[in-house]
Structure formats: C-alpha cells, structure tokens
Image: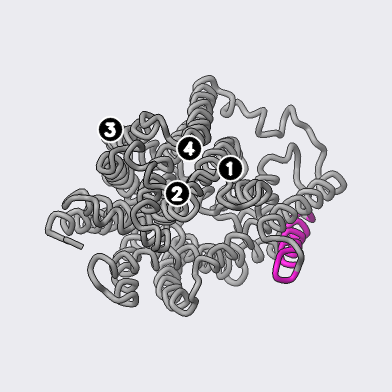
Amino acid sequence: MDWNIFDLLMVVLMFISCIWLGAIYKNVSEKSFKSYFTADGKLPLSILTGTLMSTFFSGVIIVGFGGKAASSGIVMWVGSLGLIYVMRYPIFIVAQAARNKFPPGVYTLPDFCGYYYGKTAGGLAALLNLTYNMVRYATQMLAVATLFKVVFGLDIFTGLIIAAIILLSYTMSAGVWGVATTGFIQAVVMCIGTGLACAYIFGKVGGFSGLTPLLDANTWDPLGGKSLGYWIAAMIGIGMSQWCAPELYQRFISGKNTKVTTYAWCWTVFIWVVFAACVGIPGLVARAFYSGMPGDDAVCKVYLTMLPAGFRGLWIASLLGATLSTASAHILLAGTNMSKDIYYNLFNPKISEKKLIFSTRVSIIMLGFLAIFIALKFENVFEMYLWGQWFMSAGLLIIIPGTLLWPGKVSKYAGLPTMLVGILTFLLMGKPIGPLGKNVAFMLSWANSLVVFITINLLKGGKINISKNSIFCKKELWQKNNMRVAVLGFILVVLFTLGYMISPLKQFKFDLYFWVTCFLTVLMGITLCIVFFKEYSTFSVKSVKRE
C-alpha cells in the first residue's frame, strides 16, 4: 500500500485527541464512582449520541457488513439490515424506564438484577456480563491489531500491545467521561471519513451503471442462498439482543435528562441506518474486483487501494475509531463487573468509593491484557464473541426489559428462574447438543423465559396497576416534543428501510438513494460537531468541576 505522511497524520491526530481527553477528564471522574461510571448523569445530547453511535457500530460494521455484501450480495440490504433497526428503535421507551427504575447506587445490569432479585441473580448476571464484555473487547482489539499489520507491517502481538496501551490509558483514567468524549470524536471521524470514502469509491467505479455489469447473477439473490426462516431468525436475534446490552443502559443513565436520552437514541438509530447503507457498497465493489478473496480482506483492499492519500488515512482513522470506541466501552464494563458487581456486591460491600474506583482501574488493566492472550489462544474469536452474546441475551433479554416495563411490583422470585430457563434452553436445544440451529434456539430461550417471568410475577408479584406504575403512563415519555421526535425518527428509519429493500431488488437502478445516504452520513458527523460546540459550556471540565 502506498502509505504516506498524510495518512499517518490522520491516525496520529485521532490517537492524540483520545489520550488528551482521557487526561483532562481524569480529575472530574475521581469525584465519585457515580461520576466515574455514569458521568453523574450529565452527558449532553452530542456526546451521548456520538458515544451510542460509535460504541455499537464497531469495525465489524465498517468491514464486516461490506464483507457480507462481498460474499453474499444484496441479502443484508433486502433480508435484514433495515428491519433490525426498526426493531431496535423502540428501545427509547426502555431508556425512559431505566431512568425511572434504576435506584440510586445501581449502575450496572448485575447491580439491577441484584437489587430486584437478590445476590444470586446479581452474581449470575455479573458472570454473563463479564463473559460478553471480555470477548467483545477481545474481538475489537484483534481487529485493530490486524489493521496495524496491514498498514504498518506489525505482527499481531505487537499491534495488540500498542492498541491496548493507547486504549487503556484513557479508559482507565477517565472512566465514562473518557469513553464518551472519545466516542464522540470517533463517531464524527467515522461519519465523515466513511461517508466520504464510500462516495469516492462509488464515483470512481462509475456508480451502479459501471458496477452492475461486473457482478455475477448470484449477487441479486435476495436471500443469499439461505432460507427465509434463517434470515427471520437471524434478524430477530440481532435486532432484539440489543435490548439487554449492558453498554446501552450505562449510556441511558449517564444522559443529562429524559429528553436528552430520548433524542439521543432516536438520532443514533437514524445515523446507524444511513451509515450502514454506505458501508455495503465497497463490499459490492470488492465482489466485482476481488471475487477470489475472503469478503473482509477484499473490502479492506478496496478501501486501501482505491482511496487517495489523506482520504485513506481518514478511513483508517474511522475504522480505528469504531473498534477502539467499542473496545473501550466493554473493557470499562468488564472492569466494573469485576470490581463492583463481583468483589464489592458479593464479598466486600464496605469498600470506600476511592478504593472502588482504584480497584476498577486495576481490573481494567488486568482484564485488558488478559483478554489479549485469550484472543490469541482462540483461532475463531468471532465465534467466541457470538457465544458470549448468545449466553448473555439468553439469560437477560427478558429479565431486564421485563423488569423495567412490568406494570406493578415484580416478584423477587422471578429473576433467577427466568435467567436459568433462558440459558438452559439455549444450551440444551441448540446445536451441537440439541437439534435446533443457534438462532432458533436463541428465540426459543426467550419465549420460555417470557412464560416463566410472566407466570411467576402474576402468581407472586404485586398488584398490577397500570394507571400508576407503568412506564407507559409516565409524563416524561409522552411529552409532545419527545413523541414528535420519536415519531419523526421512526418514519425516517422506516423510509430508509424500504430503500434498503427496494433499491437492491431493482439492481440499484437509482444511484440517488446511495448518494443521499453518503451525504447524510457526512452531514450527521458535521451536525454532531455543531451541536457539540453549542453545548460545550455545559460539560467542559471547568463547568463540571464547579458543579
């Protein structure tokens, strides 16, 4: 690759900004554990939206979705991608509930389970969360190390160590302040860098009129050679699993208020939709020009060979930003799982807040480097990541939203059985032990958990009183502005989802749809910057220290 100083400058500037932000917010985060882990509930709209967007849109999306388009054609547009975001959009309702039902001192999902269902349920939730966060962190760090290998010629181990030192420095020192502010920068770089890169590549190949003659007939198979049932199960599994993602709830209770949380989530999902439309196009270019290569490798080759100097560095920075943002969120959560959810909650509840912050920092360093060696030991870390996500979602998908939305007092006996039934159903019914595919076993585990949760709460829970207790009756949720934004965002997401489904089936005869998504992706990055500067005085280090 023709690497030069302009590309290097882009990458170095991003790393410097991340480390700098971690350093300046260090003192702010040390005020209390609440400040360290939830920013005292002061994250404004721009920062909250940016960190939500960048945390969940890792390098798996930038490279992985393009790689899927390279290997399977249009299936991800037609079969699932837009519909996944339609299923995720209503999470804003749960965001409202989280702000009402997370009591003082409860910061994590294991905390939450322990508060409502006892220490045993909290301990099981901690193990599920720790497994998920560790493998998610490991996969992202491997992605960064692989990029370092391609770009700088470093071996994987050296790349992992360098990436870990950079990432752990700002995550450990500043907690969620460091993760969120760097996540914002990374989101801006992702939107602008990837949007411009995809538009440039699209124009260089002559749009779809130049691209479609180079694609084979199988490209246009709307199911990609799989059954309709496979894609329905996969779509529901991917779309719904985020309803119990631990990093999501951390962000919700870190937002400034109910209005900011609602606006941030609705804006985030819209950014995801337009961003995801962009990153699939280089995958089709890779399918046309590098059909003999593995999908992910072919997509990287398209970016690295077709982009000019400077542009290429901006794209590399956006990919690094995506992976580092996701990794930092998960190693912060893993450190907290170890220090607070396991050590503090189960063994030493008398520890001071200063020692709790210190033990979290130590846990972040230990787990951060331990995960590197675990990742190197396993050949297929992506499968390990999937199992971590499946285990966590099988155990927690019903119990977390269910507790938040149940219209009455939940029974303390509902937690552990609901979680165990979900986990055991998935393990025993899914392959290789059971007869079902993992996606189907995944959904069956949710159905069984739901039956157990409802049954126990109806028999042992408090009286159902929708008029007083239900989140659906909270005034904050139904304020006019909140609902107007939510409804407008939902309409936009549905429209772009229809674009996902119709444009590929028409063999992309309308280049306008893709140009619009590239433009909107870049515009979202610029808009985040504008809102950031308008809000800066409310969360600058000086203003936060005064408060």
Image height of 447 relative to 133, above or below: above
Give yes or no for residue 39 being in the magenta stretch.
Answer: no
- In this rendering, the label closer to the viewer, 4 or 3: 4
Between disc 2 and disc 4, the foreground one is 2
Say above or below: 212 vs 357: above
Residue 86 visible at all: yes
Type of amino acid under label 3: Ile
Q: Are marks 4 and 3 in contact (CB under 8 Å)?
A: no
Q: Residue furthest left?
A: 5
Q: CA distance from mark 2 to mark 1?
A: 48 Å
- The residue identified by callout 4 is 504
Q: Which residue is mark 2?
A: 216
Q: Nearer the viewer, mark 1 or mark 3?
A: 3
Upstream in the sequence, badge 1 or badge 4?
1
Q: Tell me which residue sits at (75%, 30%) in the image.
A: 466
Q: Nearer the viewer, residue 341 or 105?
A: 341
Q: Earlier in the sequence, mark 1 or mark 3?
A: 1
SS category of the residue bearing label 2: loop
* Label at residue 530: 3
| Contact flag, marks 2 and 4 (Cβ < 8 Å) | no
Query: Residue 370: x and y, percent?
Result: 44, 76
Q: Secondary structure at mark 1?
A: helix
Residue at the image point whose x is 38% and y is 38% from the top: 44
Cβ atoms at labels 1 and 3 below 8 Å apart: no
Identified by mark 2, the residue type is Asp
Residue of label 1: 98
